[in-house]
Image (cartoon, rainbow, N blue to C red):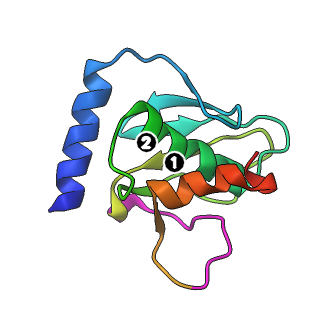
């Protein structure tokens, strides 16, 4: 139920706002891509950097709560130069691309954004 409300809220926010790009604190560019958003590749960006940008976008640009669940929706393994698509629907979730010992396929926006504070996320 909560995921449905978040998805509906995000859809309204994205529909009401211009399709301007968001520059995450690590320099990666995030753009709207229905039904979620796309983080473009930039240099040696690995999974933590993409998740940093995703969390930063959800909290900093969309203004959603820090506990909002984010899912990778583009399949791994990405080819060189490809970005990653993210969304809010757990049914569309793909593996995160991160080493995780527990938890599901999604990360909270706050957990994703904490990668911005690590060397791998910059």
Does 13 sit above or below residue 21? below
The quadrant in which the C terminus is found is top right
In the rendered structure, the answer to whether residue 108 lies left or right of residue 79 reads left
Does 118 sit above or below residue 54? below
Q: CA distance from mark 2 to mark 1?
A: 6 Å
The quadrant in which the N terminus is found is bottom left
**118 or 45: nearer the viewer:** 118
Marks 2 and 1 close (CB-CB < 8 Å) = yes
Q: Is residue 72 visible?
A: no
Helix or strand or loop: what does disc 2 sit on? helix
Please, which residue is most extreme toward the right here? 44
Helix or strand or loop: what does disc 1 sit on? helix
Which residue is found at the position 69% from the left and 52% from the top?
117
Which residue is found at the position 48% from the left and 79% from the top?
103
- Please provide percent x and percent y for residue 68: 35, 55
In the rendered structure, the answer to whether residue 114 lies left or right of residue 12 reads right
Span highlighted in magenta in the image = 91-101
Secondary structure mostly seen in the magenta stretch: loop
Q: How many marks?
A: 2
Q: Residues within 10 Å of mark 1 (few under 14, many from 20)?
A: many
- Please provide percent x and percent y for residue 16: 25, 20
Q: Which residue is mark 2?
A: 59
Residue 98 is one of the magenta-drawn residues: yes
Residue 94 is one of the magenta-drawn residues: yes
In the rendered structure, the answer to whether residue 30 lies left or right of residue 49 reads left
Q: Residues within 10 Å of mark 2 (few under 14, many from 20)?
A: some
Does 15 sit above or below residue 64? above
Which residue is found at the position 51% from the left and 64% from the top?
94
Q: Is residue 15 visible?
A: yes
Q: Which residue is mark 1?
A: 55
């Amino acid at each position: 139920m909560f995921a449905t409300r978040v998805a509906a809220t995000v859809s309204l926010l994205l529909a009401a706002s211009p399709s301007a790009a968001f520059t995450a604190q690590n320099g990666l560019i995030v753009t709207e891509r229905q039904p979620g958003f796309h983080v473009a590749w930039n240099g040696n960006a690995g999974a933590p950097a993409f998740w940093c940008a995703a969390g930063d976008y959800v909290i900093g640009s969309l203004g959603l709560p820090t506990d909002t669940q984010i899912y990778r929706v583009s399949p791994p393994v990405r080819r060189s130069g490809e970005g990653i698509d993210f969304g809010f629907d757990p049914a569309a979730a793909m593996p995160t691309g991160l080493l995780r010992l527990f938890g599901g396929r999604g990360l909270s926006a706050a957990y994703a954004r904490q990668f911005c504070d690590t060397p791998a996320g910059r």
